[in-house]
Image (tube, rainbow, N blue to C red):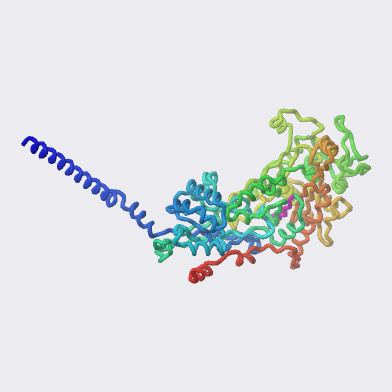
Amino acid sequence: MEFAEKETRFAARRLVWLQWGVVLVFLLLISGFWRLQILDPEYYTRLAERNHIKELPIPAPRGRILDRNGRVLVDNYPSFSIVAQWGDSKKLEEHLTGIAEGLGMEPAELARRIESARRKAPLRPILVREKASWQDVAFIEAHRSEYPGLDLMTVQTRLYPPNAFAAHLLGYVGEVSENDLDLPELALLEPGDSVGKAGIERQYSDILQGTDGARRVVVNTFGTEMAVLDARSPTPGKDLRLTIDYDLQAVAEQGFQEESGALIALDPRTGEVLALVSRPTFDPNLFTSGISRQDWVRLVTDPNNPLVNRAIQAQLAPGSIFKIILASAALESGVAREDTSFYCPGGASFYGRYFKCWQTKGHGRVNLHQAIVHSCDVFFYNLGKNLGVERIADYAGQFGLGRRTGIDLPHEEVGTVPSPEWKERVFREEWYAGETISLAIGQGALTVTPLQVAYSTGGIASGGYFARPRLVLPQELAARGRKVLPGAGVRVALQEATVAAVTDALYGVVNEGGTGGRARIAGLDVGGKTGTAQIASIKAARTAREAGLRLRDNAWFVGLAPRRNPEIVVVVLYQGGEHGYLAAPLARDVIKTYFDKKNGIRPQLAIQAEPNKQAAVLAPTASQVERSREGL
C-alpha cells in the first residue's frame, strides 16, 4: 500500500512537469508568432522573399566628356559584371576554388574580393568580375544550378581614348574609398560605387555621376530568372563639354613623343584651356574596372612619376622666361626704360661673385629690347640688382606666380616665389644679396608651373587682365545646375608703354634673329621667349659629371599670337631638353593649327583618339547573351 502511494505521488509530479513543459512550449510558440506577426513582420517577410526574389542594381552610365566642338573624348560601352548576392557569400566561399577556376581567376584574388565586399558593403552584391568575357558568360549560364548565387549585371563601363590621349586632363574613375566617403560632396555615395578619382572625372563627378536603378526578379531554386517584378530605370549622368580643342590636343600629343614634360595652350582673353598635355602618361582604361595590383605598383614606383600632371604640378625653375616678369616689373616701377642699357662682356661680378652670361663671348651693349631678344643674362643681373628682391617678389605675385591660378582641376600646385620673409620662415636663414642675382634670371629657389607661365604671360600681353583658366565654361556649368563661383579674372594696372615694349621684344625673339626663331610662322604675328633652367647646383652638376652622369637642363618656351592681346598662349616644357629653342617648334605647330582651323584649314593628324569608334567590339551585348541562353 505504501509503495502504491509513492508511485501515485511520483506519477503526479511527472504529470505536473509535463504540463509545465507543454505550457512552456506553447509560450515559446506564441512568442515566436508574436515576433513574426506583430513585432517585425516586414523584416521576416523580406527574409522570406530573398529565398525567391533577387534585387539587382542597375548602375547609371556616367555622362560623356566632349571637346569644345562636341567630339567625344570619353564614352561608355555596355558590358557585364559577375556578381553574387550577399546572402550567398558563404556558399560562394564553399565553391571558391571551382568558381575561380571557371572564371580563370586566382582563388586568393577571389577570396580577397569577397572579404573586401563583406567589410565595405555587407548589403550590396559582391562584385566577382568586371568586363565579363564570352567565356565568363558561358560559364555562369552553364553552372546556374551549381552556383545559383551568381548573376550577370549589365553595366556601362568607362571608355577612354587609346594611347593615353589627354589622360591627365580627363582623369579616371575608380571605386569610392573610405576617405572619399568622408568628403561632403560624396556623402550620398555608398561603398562599392564608382567615382571620379582624378582630372575632369573628379572635378565634375557630381555632374557626370548618374543615379543607379534596380530590378527585382523572381528566381527558382536553381537561381534561374523566372519573372521580373519591377524595375527602376537608372538616371544617366549629364554630358560635359570642355573648352579643349581635339585637334590642338592631338597636335600637342603627337609632338611630344616619348619626352618628359608638359604643354598647355589657353586663350588669355577668356581663360579657356585649349590643350593640356603631360608626359610621361598612363592609360586611364586600366582603372575602369579596378586596376590590378601589379599595374598599380608599376605606376606608383615608376621614377618618372607618370601619375603627376606636370602641366599644373611640376614646380620647376623657369629660367629665362622669367625675364618677361622682370622686364615688366622694371618698366612699371621706373627702375628701367626702353633705352636703359648695360654692357655684357660675357659675365659680371656682383657681391664678390662672378656670374656668367650664357653667351660666353658676351652681347656687348644691349638695351631692354635687345636683352630680351637675345636673352642676355648680364642685363637682367643688373636689372635684378636695381629692383631688389622685395619688388621682384611683389610683381611676380601680382602676375600670378606663387599662387594657384584657380583652374578647375584638382591638386594644382602653387610654386615658390622666394623672398627674405620666405627664407626666414622656411629655412630660418637670412637672404643673401647674391641670391637676388640668380633670381633675376629665373634660377635659385624660384619655381613655377607651366600653367602659371601661360597665365602670367597671357595676362601681361593682354594689358594686365589675367583671366582665370577654365576647362568648362560658366554657362555650361549653370546649364547643369552647378553653382558658378565668382572671380573670372584679375586686373593689374599696366602701362600701355610697358605692354608694348615687352610684347615687341617677344616678337623680336621669334622674328628678329632671337633665340626663338624656330617658332616663326609666315604671315602670323608670333612672339615668344625661350628658357633654359638648371636642375642642379653647379656643385651638384660637377659631382654628377665626375660620376659619369650628365644632368641635362630643362627647356622652356612660351609662345603667343598675336603679340598684343593674344588669342592663344602656348607653354612647352621639355624636362631634360637642355635648350628652350628645342621646345619652340611644338608651340609653333599648336599655334599654326589654331589659326589654320580659324581660317577653315583642317589639320592633318597622325593620331585618331575618339573612343566611341572602338566601343562596339569590346564586350558581349545583352541581346547576344539572351541568344546564348536560348541555346543552352
Magenta segment's dominant SS is strand
Q: Is residue 161 left or right of residue 578?
A: left
Q: Is residue 152 left or right of residue 67?
A: left
274 w.r.t. 313: above or below: below
Can I make out residue 66 in this image? yes
Q: How many marks?
A: 0
Which residue: 21% across, 44% down?
Answer: 24
296 w.r.t. 436: above or below: below
In which quadrant of the rendered view does residue 385 lie?
top right
Which residue: 76% across, 67% down?
Answer: 601
Please provide percent x and percent y for residue 510: 84, 54
Which residue: 45% across, 57% down?
Answer: 149
Boundaries of the magenta span: 261-270
* Closer to us: 39 or 561: 39
Magenta stretch holds residue 8: no
Magenta stretch holds residue 262: yes
